[in-house]
Image (spheres, grey):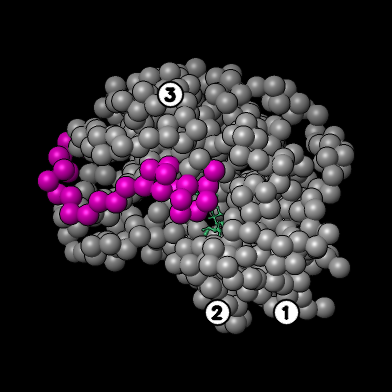
Amino acid sequence: MSKNVLIVGAGLGGLATALRLAKKGHKVEIIEKNSQAGGRLNQIKKDGFTFDTGPSFFSMSFEFKEFAKDCNIDLPFKYIELDPLYTVNFSDNPKTFYLYKDIKKLAAQFKDVEPDFEERMTNYLKNSGALFHDTVDLVIKNNFDSVFSYIVTLMRVNPTHIPVLFRSFYQEVKRNFNSKEARQIVSLVAFFLGRTPFDTMAIYTLLSYTEFKHDGYFNVEGGMYKITEGIVNELLKENVKITYNTEIVDFVGNGKKLEYLIDSKGQKWSSDIILVNGDAAVFRSRVFKREKYALEKLDKMNWTMGYLTFYVGLKCKLPQVNHHNYYLGSNFEEYANNVLQNPDSLQKPYYYVNVLSKYNLECAPEGCESLFFVCPVPNLQHKPNWDDKDEIVNSIIADFSKRIDKNIEPEIVSKTIYTPLEWQDQFNLHRGSGLGLSHSMNQIGAFRPSNFDEKFKNVYYVGASTIPGAGLPMAIISSKLAFQRIEKHK
Ligand SMILES: Cc1cc2nc3c(=O)[nH]c(=O)nc-3n(C[C@H](O)[C@H](O)[C@H](O)COP(=O)(O)OP(=O)(O)OC[C@H]3O[C@@H](n4cnc5c(N)ncnc54)[C@H](O)[C@@H]3O)c2cc1C
């Protein structure tokens, strides 16, 4: 039977669920706070340059393929496999490490510091692969109705994995590799979960398997925003209406039913079913004003780090810089242990640089380059004041110029900076936390804010702070889980 569904938020989670539902004949409408779709998967067009604002590559391409198959469409964007995945540069080592998927080619780069790297990496990936395959269908791609059903499911996971529950990502990596270079490079992926390898559980070493072995990383032809544009086009074909510049701020409920939502201009929005794509904890706090999610309780939850991102247009090319690059200092452990909470650690920032125009020439004027910098920083809980943003950005630009042996400062013709304040305000992210709730033991599976509402039987959730978690493939999985719930809704 066809249902009416109103979706609050046009991030990837909301868009993907909308398409799944519309393709099954449900009547779907979307409202979005901002003036364009995509949420964090967004785009800035400025001064003739195009920049992706958040994600710059994705893993688990098979989830996107499955999504297209479920919706009976061809995937509405083209993706390209990355190999090397990215480069890593240390401040105290002139060598650039190329992260090839071919383990022999990768190992060759570690021959001076870790001569048996190939054997060690093969063994490490065997274990992380077993973790991936033993949990992905059972735990990650599953709806749980209760904590009890979640625990029962966990008990079905192969018990050989129990020891990793008691180790950090870095401890697991340390057991497998001896050199500081291998340890730091292999544990970088923990930052992609919005925390550091020192406070991320070792079960997430399964990400090493997804990056190096199982599937790898992918870029999107024309930039990551093509994902958003492609899905929006498919939605338009299905007559799904998206209303922009509309932020939900209040509600009226009647017992177990949400009667309607109210936007900031006082307009009422009602539907049989409401799907919330705004952050699942923040929405319960700000809109539903739930006691369990009161501001002081949100602050006690475990949030991911903030990001200082900046988007720079240059009036020159940078042939010496690769597509995806990490620039690390020489104090990895000290830095990682401080970066989430201690703003002083920013004196020597670590950062990532993406050159979007390298393979997407249309993203910069001729002879120019479009750069995107991401620097992990404390979120607003630990660094509320960003008056020093220009100083920090300038220090990163100076460091980058030194590392690539070219002063880019005089070449800059466009610059946009997002601190955690901008991330917070644009997308309603708690304290500017870039990826939402972190993935600590007590905040995953049935312990994460659920994708069905505790009180209103006609409200569901999709996106990074509900199950399964952060990242683009997780948003796609989350859309499938939310879709399954709505399909079952009576
Ligand atoms: C800097 C950065 C880099 C990243 N890099 C990568 C990467 O390389 N690869 C990867 O896989 N992932 C990456 N991610 C993570 C990825 O972007 C997110 O996990 C994903 O985009 C989240 O999608 P979502 O649908 O859950 O939420 P969102 O994208 O946040 O969408 C939610 C939408 O809801 C809207 N909204 C919120 N509240 C309301 C309201 N009250 N009323 C109306 N609308 C509302 C918001 O405006 C937003 O459009 C990155 C994230 C950041 C911040």
Relative to 454, does residue 190 appear above or below in the rendering?
above
Check disc 3: other Cα within 10 Å, few if <14, some if 14-19, many if 20+. Answer: some
Front residue of 439/276: it is: 276
- Label 3, on which residue? 342
The answer to whether mark 1 is within 8 Å of ligand 1 is no
The answer to whether mark 2 is within 8 Å of ligand 1 is no
- The range drawn in magenta is 404-430
Could you tell whether 130 is left or right of 183 in the image?
right
Could you tell whether 79 is left or right of 238 in the image?
left
Q: Nearer the viewer, mark 3 or mark 2?
A: 3
- Label 2, on which residue? 236
The quadrant in which residue 294 appears is top right
Q: CA distance from mark 1 to mark 2?
A: 14 Å
Relative to 298, does residue 42 appear above or below in the rendering?
below
Q: Residue furthest left?
A: 410
Residue at x 51% of width, y 29% of height: 196
Q: CA distance from mark 1 to mark 3?
A: 51 Å
Residue 58 screen position, x and y as percent? 51, 51
Query: What amino acid type should be assigned to the residue bearing mark 2?
Result: Leu
Front residue of 490/261: it is: 261
Q: Residue furthest front?
A: 266
Query: What amino acid type should be assigned to the residue bearing mark 3?
Result: Asn
Residue at x 50% of width, y 70% of height: 244
The label on residue 25 is 1
Residue 411 in magenta?
yes
